[in-house]
């Protein structure tokens, strides 16, 4: 199969491309604009006979049409992905997440191309800490931030294109990913690289917010499963039962890196900060037979810490500018 992977130079997209090359015989074309979040270094070493990189914008209709025409399937990861950025400058989130997705699904419907849309659990809003409930495919949409509202909007576009135009699409909504190649603006890499730099980790507010962590490789295997066996028009939630509060994660990082568990600072909270995400992935497991492989979060976190220690050349160029931006925000 010839796959077109949008956003393949970003965190989850690049992990997916490596996973596909290692575990299938598909050919991959990556379309990526190389924004601040895209990094060609994340795609180094891939075999040229099975991989091609195209620099471009998913909102460029002519380029998108040409690439979609050549593909058997599109896997759409490209997005503006960081909540904090969306609170300071929402516009790029509308351009990429809404108009970019619209441009891709228009091309996919013209060419009858299979389309898989990558989305997030954040479209469902948040849960109380003591609520036994988890998100399911039936949970009503209730996004909180400019980022999550544009992802929700893009999901609804895909659903409408399926119903109105017969777009051959599936959607997945996944929880928080961790692993290699994640930008240092995000929670786990920010704290690991702070500790490497001798800087204390920064916890927003009280640190009681809960995220449902999944290793990026488990996200990739779930997406391949949906691409292979998913039913057109269906949504699948992806999660690995990885709920942890932020304070516990910071303490684990500090302990694993040989620091006292309380060597962190509390900083100003994120406005509108979602309290808890939790995924019920029963549908994906029961209907498509998927299950995660990385069930030991502490082991996965230790491997991720080792990756950042060993790949300073990958993250160092982004670190100072990222921290300068956070400093301006008091975070
Ligand atoms: P990321 O910010 O690391 O990567 C995004 C990539 O998209 C970058 O390579 C960037 O250059 C590219 N891009 C941005 N705008 C573009 C445009 N207009 N045209 C072409 N390329 C463009 O993001 P990520 O964390 O890897 O997230 C990837 C996808 O997964 C997003 O759709 C996100 O909503 C979704 N998701 C992320 C998580 C998570 O935990 N990070 C969880 C669930 C879903
Ligand atoms: O749930 C899926 C979502 O997970 C994806 O859709 C997003 O693209 C992805 O960025 C992520 O969103 P979060 O906002 O949950 O991730 P982030 O890494 O920004 O923050 C994780 C938690 O850590 C959140 O509760 C905020 C907190 N945090 C974050 C940073 C950067 C801190 O306490 N300190 C920090 O320095």
Image (tube, grey):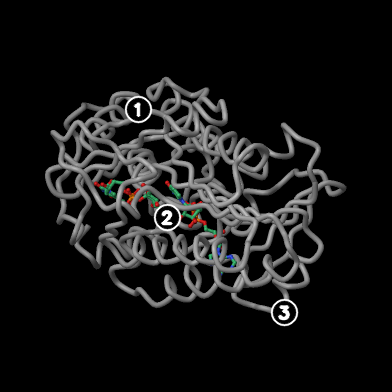
Q: Upstream in the sequence, badge 3 or badge 2?
A: 3
- How far across and how far down the image is residue 232, in percent? 60, 49
Q: Residues within 10 Å of mark 1 (few under 14, many from 20)?
A: some
Q: Does label 3 point to a residue whose CB lies under 8 Å from ligand 1? A: no
Give the position of the C terminus as an image quadrant: bottom left
Q: Which quadrant of the structure image shows residue 129?
A: top left
The answer to whether residue 45 is left or right of residue 321 is: right
The residue labelled by disc 1 is 257
The answer to whether residue 50 is left or right of residue 210 is: right
Disc 1 to disc 2: CB gap under 8 Å: no
The residue labelled by disc 2 is 319
Q: Upstream in the sequence, badge 1 or badge 3?
A: 3
Q: CA distance from mark 1 to mark 2?
A: 19 Å
Q: Residues within 10 Å of mark 2 (few under 14, many from 20)?
A: some
Q: Residue at x 63, y 62 (%)?
A: 166
The residue labelled by disc 3 is 62
Mark nearest the camera among 1 and 3 is 3
Q: CA distance from mark 3 to mark 2?
A: 35 Å
Q: Upstream in the sequence, badge 1 or badge 2?
A: 1
- How far across and how far down the image is residue 165, in percent? 61, 68
Q: CA distance from mark 1 to mark 3?
A: 48 Å
Callout 3 secondary element: helix
């Amino acid at each position: 199969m010839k796959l077109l992977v949008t956003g393949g130079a970003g965190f989850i997209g690049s992990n997916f491309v490596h996973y596909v090359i290692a575990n299938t015989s598909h050919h991959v074309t990556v379309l990526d604009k190389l924004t601040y979040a895209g990094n060609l270094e994340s795609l180094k070493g891939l075999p040229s006979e099975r991989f091609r990189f195209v620099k471009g914008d998913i909102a460029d209709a002519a380029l998108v049409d040409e690439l979609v025409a050549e593909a058997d399937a599109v896997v759409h990861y490209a997005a503006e992905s960081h909540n904090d950025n969306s609170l300071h400058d929402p516009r790029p989130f509308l351009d990429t997440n809404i108009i970019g997705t619209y441009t891709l699904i228009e091309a996919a419907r013209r060419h009858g191309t299979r389309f898989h849309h990558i989305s997030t659990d954040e479209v469902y809003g948040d849960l109380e800490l003591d609520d036994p409930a988890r998100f399911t495919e039936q949970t009503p949409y209730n996004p909180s931030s400019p980022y999550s509202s544009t992802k929700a909007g893009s999901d609804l576009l895909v659903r409408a294109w399926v119903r109105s135009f017969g777009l051959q699409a599936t959607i997945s909504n996944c929880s928080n990913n961790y692993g290699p190649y994640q930008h240092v603006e995000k929670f786990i890499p920010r704290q690991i690289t702070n500790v490497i730099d001798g800087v204390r980790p920064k916890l927003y507010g009280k640190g009681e917010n809960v995220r449902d962590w999944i290793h990026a490789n488990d996200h990739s295997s779930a997406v391949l499963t949906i691409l292979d066996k998913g039913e057109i028009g269906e949504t699948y939630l992806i999660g690995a039962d990885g709920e942890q509060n932020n304070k516990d994660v910071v303490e684990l990082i500090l302990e694993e890196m040989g620091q006292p568990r309380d060597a962190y600072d509390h900083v100003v909270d994120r406005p509108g900060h979602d309290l808890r995400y939790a995924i019920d992935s029963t549908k994906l497991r029961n209907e498509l037979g998927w299950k995660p492989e990385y069930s030991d979060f502490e082991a996965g976190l230790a491997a991720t810490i080792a990756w950042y220690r060993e790949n300073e050349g990958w993250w160092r160029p982004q670190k100072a500018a990222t921290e300068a931006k956070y400093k301006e925000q008091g975070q």
